[in-house]
Amino acid sequence: MASVSTRYALVGLLIAVIAIVAIAYLYLGGGGYGGQETTSPGEEATGAGGSTVVKVELYEWGIKIDKTVFKAGEKVVFEVVNKGSYTHAFEIENDEIGFEVETENLAPGESTRLEVVFPQTGEYEVYCPIGGHRDRGMEALITVSG
């Protein structure tokens, strides 16, 4: 059986290793929201290849989208995070042209990216496709101009 001082030394070593791993995790970018780019109010973020980066928050019972007006042919990367307490998803569609894209279901706290190129002008519906969530207010509109 190990002595009390040996046990304290092992516990201290374990705590030091955990602290080093946590610091390395944060230093290497593991502590943020997907390495997102930040912008000043009114400034548009651009990603690789000139795409527009738009932040989306899903919550009970709404959707917050930083930007809702785009140009046809523009590549948009939606960075979607579930800030709610229930599972949500993010869908964009335009029934008139048969356009529909969506994320996988996101558990509370999860995030994902959805890359979209809007094929033509018009209004695109945005909503949470999980049963009943849209009816409770989780919907918005995106406008695509020429």
Image (cartoon, helix red, strand yellow):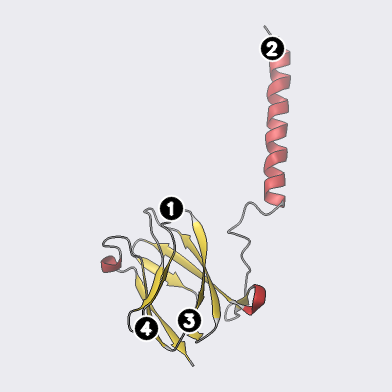
Residue, x 32% and y 60% (percent of image)?
130
Label 4 vs label 1, nearer the camera: 4
Quickly name the residue at label 3. 118
The reply, left or right, for residue 133 in relation to residue 19 is: left
**Label 4 vs label 1: CA separation?**
32 Å
Quickly name the residue at label 1. 108
Residue, x 71% and y 45% (percent of image)?
23
Q: Is residue 40 visible?
A: no
How dense is the environment of label 1, judged by Cα within 10 Å: few (below 14), some, or many (20 and up)? some
How dense is the environment of label 4, judged by Cα within 10 Å: few (below 14), some, or many (20 and up)? few
Residue, x 26% and y 68% (percent of image)?
135
- Label 1 sits on a secondary structure element that is loop
Quickly name the residue at label 2. 4
Q: Position of residue 10 (x, y in %)?
A: 71, 21
- Label 4 sits on a secondary structure element that is loop
Quickly name the residue at label 4. 97
Residue 18, quarter of picture: top right
Could you tell which of marks 1 and 3 lies nearer the N-terminus?
A: 1
The amino acid beneath tag 3 is Phe
